[in-house]
Image: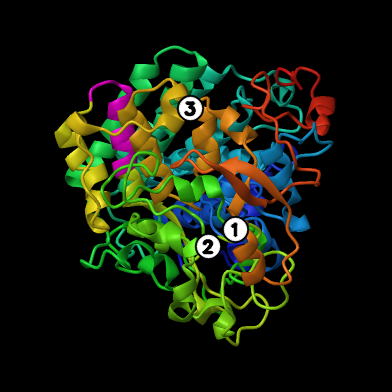
């Protein structure tokens, strides 16, 4: 935590340096204050300046790359945990999450000003470019200078990649600008040119960052291994985007993704957290306050009373609940999808859903028998699940309560904004998933590749291995237009990385936005459910139970609301619109197609 806490004095220095490029400030060297002419001398100067970048990146709304939890009231929406609400994994109903609901339903419009996680944060790029323009003034070894330049370029490449993924073409800037710089009114840089620059930044970062900053990484600065994971993530997105949406050099990007991930796998100091307890290991470390020393966690955000805190556990119910679609994607214990396995017990009552399933399901969704185990809703002794309309306790919009990150110890007796639940930002499991997917998309995946990636994740939860010669065919996904092996790798990614901020971006890069036209449903609703959940105020619709093909009644989360009948317009919804304020300030900016 100490590495990205910024004291008032450091902030003062950063502000002065950022403003220091204005002509009227540079006319002479100040004798009584910090300036660019006098500041850039020692390694500590560079370290302190980069500390300010970490601190600014903690604003997850403006700079959503090191995504964690906001503190205070912002905890209710600016959290990595809530990003799956943009997609089909979770079904929020709280009015404070209306932005997630709008995007999920395809009902968002061109905003007047930048909205959540939107077209903003550009002053962060200015701060980075100021540093890059001055690091070489320090009278220290070039190798040391390059480390801090690599840190800044990792931030810049990561930031721009995130903007490209949301908006397409971006205004690429790699030098400090003044208020009269022509670049302020330039048109957007074409996507492929911008991403070439992103790759150059990420390559520099992976070549010059140290393996270990000597700070214990608990959590400290971003090291080379973290940069390699970021590179694999960015390259996988870009490679699959170009493969399915059109674009040049898709294979080059996929090869870069696979190679970056493989370097971490071969040479990095990380491994999966695994104590040999398949019924608990998957979610055990997602529910603790201190992740120091965890071999799987590559970068995380620490919260500590008196330093930096959050309120995210108390806002957990805003997430609504896990969707029927998500629950149905977990395999049975024979390694087969519910559509073809004879082990599936159906969904007549919620307990049936957990029988003979991947243990990650029960470690993600609350089983009614586990309420006491987790001290659910602060040990209130009420029966769960509890659905919309029931009084008391914690309510789920779908009937599927989320348990993956639940930590009752961070709730009991804690006042507003004094909680300390950490945020896992980068973890080794994603390295394995990125590698397997990139190799599969290249058409080069081998059984050895699967055994060193997907099957390690399955070993942790005692699930059967994925075998190239015996890949199941799930009839629900035969129209996706990809081989069954890619379907299963995508399923593994959805299951393993649930509620970690990937699903919406994954659907977009795979060109599977049409999946968002399916309504968000919950548990099966019948006479027994109505009696069990007395007082419920829910709406239902008919839907198919995939295993039997029969039609039943299910909770319909958004029936009779503004978010009913979701749409996904292939001509525009893969990119977000630029806000009107940006267009009015720069006549050379063009709106994205379809908006």
Res 240 quadrant in image: top left
Q: Which residues are magenta?
A: 432-444
Residue at 58 percent across and 49 percent down: it is 83
Q: Residues within 10 Å of mark 3 (few under 14, many from 20)?
A: some
Q: Residue at x 21, y 44 (%)?
A: 465
Label 3: which secondary element: loop
Residue 388 shows which numbered tag? none
What main secondary structure does the magenta stretch of the protein show? helix
- Residue 358 included in the magenta stretch of the image: no
Element carrying mark 2? loop
Residue 12 x, y percent position in the rendering: 65, 60
Gap in Å between the C-alphas at discs 3 and 2? 26 Å
- Horizontal side, residue 162 vs residue 333: left or right: right
Tag 3 residue: 510
**Along the viewing direction, whichever of 69 and 532 lies nearer the viewer:** 532
Q: Earlier in the sequence, mark 3 or mark 1?
A: 1
549 versus 417 height, above or below: above
């Amino acid at each position: 935590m100490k590495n990205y806490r910024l004291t008032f004095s450091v902030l003062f220095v950063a502000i002065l340096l950022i403003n220091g490029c204005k002509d009227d400030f540079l006319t002479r060297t100040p004798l009584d204050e910090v300036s660019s002419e006098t500041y850039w001398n020692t390694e500590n100067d560079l370290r302190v300046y980069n500390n300010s970048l970490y601190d600014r990146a903690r604003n997850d709304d403006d700079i959503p790359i090191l995504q964690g939890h906001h503190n205070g009231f912002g905890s209710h929406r600016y959290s990595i945990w809530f990003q799956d609400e943009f997609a089909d994994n979770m079904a929020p109903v709280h009015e404070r999450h209306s932005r997630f609901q709008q995007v999920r339903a395809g009902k968002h419009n061109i905003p007047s000003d930048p909205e959540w996680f939107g077209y903003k944060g550009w002053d962060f790029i200015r701060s980075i470019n100021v540093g890059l323009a001055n690091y070489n003034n320090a009278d220290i070894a070039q190798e040391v200078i390059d480390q801090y330049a690599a840190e800044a370029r990792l931030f810049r490449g990561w930031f721009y990649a995130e903007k490209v993924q949301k908006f397409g073409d971006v205004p690429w800037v790699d030098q400090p600008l003044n208020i009269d710089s022509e670049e302020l009114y330039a048109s957007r840089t074409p996507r492929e040119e911008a991403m070439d620059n992103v790759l150059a930044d990420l390559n520099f970062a992976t070549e010059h960052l140290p393996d270990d900053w000597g700070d214990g990484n608990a959590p400290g600065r971003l090291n080379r291994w973290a940069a390699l994971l970021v590179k694999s993530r960015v390259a996988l997105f870009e490679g699959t985007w170009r493969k399915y949406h059109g674009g040049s050099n898709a294979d080059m990007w996929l090869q870069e993704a696979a190679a970056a991930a493989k370097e971490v796998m071969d040479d990095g100091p990380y491994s999966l957290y695994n104590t040999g307890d398949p019924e608990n290991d998957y979610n055990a470390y997602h529910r603790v306050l201190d992740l120091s020393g965890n071999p799987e966690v590559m970068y995380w955000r620490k919260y500590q009373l008196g330093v930096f805190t959050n309120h995210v556990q108390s806002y957990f119910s805003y997430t609504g609940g896990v969707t029927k679609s998500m629950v149905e994607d977990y395999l049975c214990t024979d390694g087969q999808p519910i559509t073809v396995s004879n082990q599936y017990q159906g969904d007549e009552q919620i307990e049936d859903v957990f029988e003979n399933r991947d243990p990650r399901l029960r470690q993600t969704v609350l089983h009614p028998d586990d309420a006491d185990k987790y001290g659910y809703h602060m040990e209130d002794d009420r029966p769960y699940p509890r659905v919309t309309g029931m009084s008391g306790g914690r309510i789920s919009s779908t009937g599927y309560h989320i348990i993956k990150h639940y930590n009752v110890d961070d709730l009991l007796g804690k006042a507003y904004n004094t909680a300390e639940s950490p945020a896992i930002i980068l973890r080794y499991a994603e390295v394995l998933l990125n590698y397997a997917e990139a190799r599969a998309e290249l058409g080069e995946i081998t059984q050895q590749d699967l055994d060193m990636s997907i099957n390690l994740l399955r070993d942790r939860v005692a699930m059967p291995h994925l075998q190239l010669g015996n890949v199941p065919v799930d009839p629900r996904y035969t129209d996706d237009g990809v081989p069954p092996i890619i379907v299963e790798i995508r399923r593994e990614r959805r299951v393993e990385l649930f509620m970690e901020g990937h699903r919406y971006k994954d659907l977009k890069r795979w060109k599977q936005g049409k999946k968002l036209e399916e309504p968000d449903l919950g548990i099966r609703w019948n006479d027994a459910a109505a009696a069990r959940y007395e007082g419920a105020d829910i709406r239902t619709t008919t839907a198919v139970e995939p295993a039997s093909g029969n039609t039943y009644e299910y909770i319909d989360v958004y029936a009779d609301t503004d978010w009913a009948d979701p749409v996904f317009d292939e001509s525009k919804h893969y990119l977000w619109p630029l806000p009107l304020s940006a267009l009015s300030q720069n006549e050379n900016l063009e709106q994205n197609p379809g908006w």
